[in-house]
Image: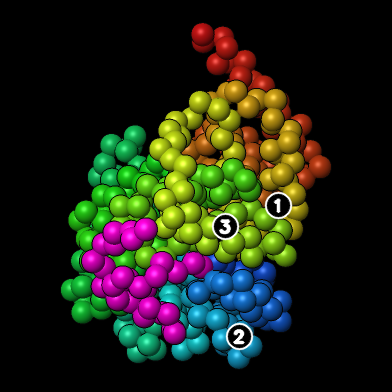
Amino acid sequence: MELPRNPTRAVRIGRLTIGAGHPIAVQSMCATKTQDVEATAAQANDLAAAGAEVVRLAVDSQRDADAVARIRERTRANLCVDLQEHYRLAAAVAPHVDKVRYNPGHLYHHERRKGWRQKVAFLAETAAKHDCALRVGVNCGSVDPAKKDAFDPRDSVSPMVASALEHCACLDDLGFTRYCVSLKDSDPAKVIEANRRFAAARPDVPLHLGVTEAGLPPDGVIKTRIAFEQLISRGIGDTIRVSLTVPNAHKGEEIAAGKEILDDIAAGRVRSVVDYGLRSLNIISCPSCSRVENEAFVELAEQVRELTSYAQDHALTIAVMGCRVNGPGETDDADLGLWCGPHFVNLKRGGESLGAYPYSEILPRLKEELDALIGAKAGRR
Ligand code: SF4
């Protein structure tokens, strides 16, 4: 079956080109510590062998950046670096990678007196100098605060789309067009809406699709499939990542799931339209990456799913996140949130912090809060 494709421009990422009708590329991310050069290079090679056309690495410090040069020597995978607050590390990593991802919502933390446009100009100049592509990676949990303030707080999609469009215009004005965009949320319905709206406004910009914190398989694959079916069948999407909470050794499952979804869509084996309205318990968990602060995180996500199975029929969302970088922000919208530190798990009810608990004590505390929420709901009926 011939799928329609939006007329996006070609963007080269190392030996790969996305957009302009090129096959939709599947990518993944290393979850090893970036500074563990041998383990990260091995995982990058494993992911590439499994079919990852781009492999992403998290870089949060100069030491991570130093490791990237050594990882580059050990793998031929097309490499992308994921920068958070430390946008200046682009200069150290760009000579060794093929693409740099920055998050517009993270350009506010460092050098506060410098405007974001100046920082984007630095990123574009650095990418151009070192033959790199850029990804403007907008994420629901860390949207540009100025954009959030401009919209109704109940509307989380408009600030994401506005932020992405603003950064595209900025890059275009700078004469840098070798970029793609992503708009990710943990809710597939919001991913669909954000990407549709963005693609309608900028059909020329290649899109990287993903449902962030999709969670454990099989639910994580199902959520992702819902979003991808709705978008790809309408010509939207040039590269994809399936984010799954799986142990390190199973990261290849992300690639297998992505390929299977693409094959099914191409063959017309679509399973939507599924209404993803929250009428049952929804557990979201991050796919883990090198920023995970305690290896117990993946096991904890599984334990949360088992422990809460009794609440399956309640329309509640529980978020389980692996680190302090994205955990605090990305648990705000959940009814109950857990984000993992090195020794403690932080528990939240919506945006409110309920304290930090040792890994051995968090599950009973979570159950207590879940029971209270269910009880409160029953009382309101
Ligand atoms: S929440 Fe933290 S550990 Fe999990 S994927 Fe995001 S950055 Fe990585």
Q: Distance between the residues labelled 1 and 2?
A: 26 Å
Mark 1 or 3, closer to the camera: 3
For residue 368, above or below residue 331: above
Image location (x, y in percent) of residue 268: 42, 51
Q: How is the image coloured?
A: rainbow
Which SS type dominates the magenta stretch?
Answer: loop
- For image coordinates 58% across by 15% down, the residue present is 376
Name the residue beneath numbered marker 2: 75
Report helix, strand or loop for mark 3: helix
- For image coordinates 67% across by 55% down, the residue present is 246
Are dots 1 and 3 in contact, CB under 8 Å? no
Residue 346: assigned label? none
Residue 257: assigned label? 3
Q: How far apart are marks 1 and 3 (CA)?
A: 18 Å
The quadrant of the image that shows the N terminus is bottom left
Q: Which amino acid does label 3 sit on?
A: Ala
- Nearer to us in this view, 275 or 370: 275
Image location (x, y in percent) of residue 28: 55, 66
Q: Give the range drawn in magenta.
A: 1-27
Q: In which quarter of the image is residue 69?
A: bottom right
Left or right: where 253 falls relative to 54: right
Name the residue beneath numbered marker 1: 298
